[in-house]
Image: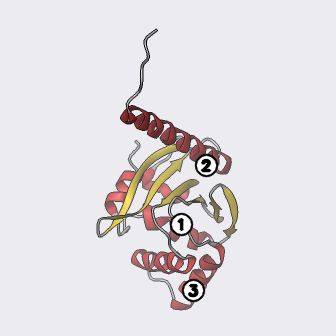
Amino acid sequence: MKNIAASPYQISAAGLFFLFFHTQALAHGAVEAALAGARLSGSGTLRFLGLEVYQAQLWVRPGFDQAHWAQQPLALELRYARGFSADAIARRSIEEIGRQQAVPAAQAERWQQELAALLPDVAAGDRLLGVYQPGQGMRFLFNGRPLGSIDDPWFARLFFGIWLSPQSSEPTLRAALLAAP
């Protein structure tokens, strides 16, 4: 009987393969529960000064039309590569919203407070899933658990526009998310 030993590289490759597909299956399960019939549209990585901030995945239903993204339900998942406070995430989100459209200062402040109160602090490996429902608002899941919702259609459209609007500050990431035909 021949004794065959796998090299550490083969084991690592097999382990990474399993981990990738297991993680994808878990992610799809959470998305499917939040947005029935969803399929992956595209994914990309946000980097700042060369450092990975998060990996993003856009999930859409069949027939999704990227030219009219704001009129269709969708889900966006961010897997963070480093930690951030809820306040920092909310502040940056409102700054990015301001790049798309002018928002009265009092409204922007209310949105920032609402978002900071809803979102948790995140650490490397945490997953934040946002589900956009046009004309209704948005809801969030954190590591697969429901967080809550914000029932403000205008805020929801602008929030998801951070990644999907033609005015996004990250056009390369936007293109990667909207990659599927």
Distance from Cα at disc 3 to Cα at disc 1: 29 Å
Q: Are marks 2 and 3 in contact (CB under 8 Å)?
A: no
Q: Earlier in the sequence, mark 2 or mark 3?
A: 2
- Report the number of discs: 3
Residue placed under numbered mark 1 in the picture: 123
- The residue identified by callout 2 is 31
> Which part of the image, by quadrant, shows the C terminus?
top left
* Amino acid type at image mark 1: Ala
Proximity of marks 2 and 1: CB atoms separated by less than 8 Å: no
Which residue corresponds to mark 3? Answer: 107
| Residue 72 visible | no
Percent position of residue 8, x then y: 39, 35
- Seen as rendered, the residue at the extreme left is 49
- Image position of 16 with respect to 150: above or below: above
Nearer-N-terminus badge (3/1): 3
At horizontal 43% and vertical 75% (from top left) the residue drawn is 96
Q: Amino acid at mark 2?
A: Val
Residue type pointed to by label 3? Gln
Please tell me which residue lies in front, 130 or 142: 142
Which residue is at 46% across, 48% downward? 65
Cα–Cα gap, marks 2 and 1:
20 Å
Q: Is residue 155 left or right of residue 9?
A: right
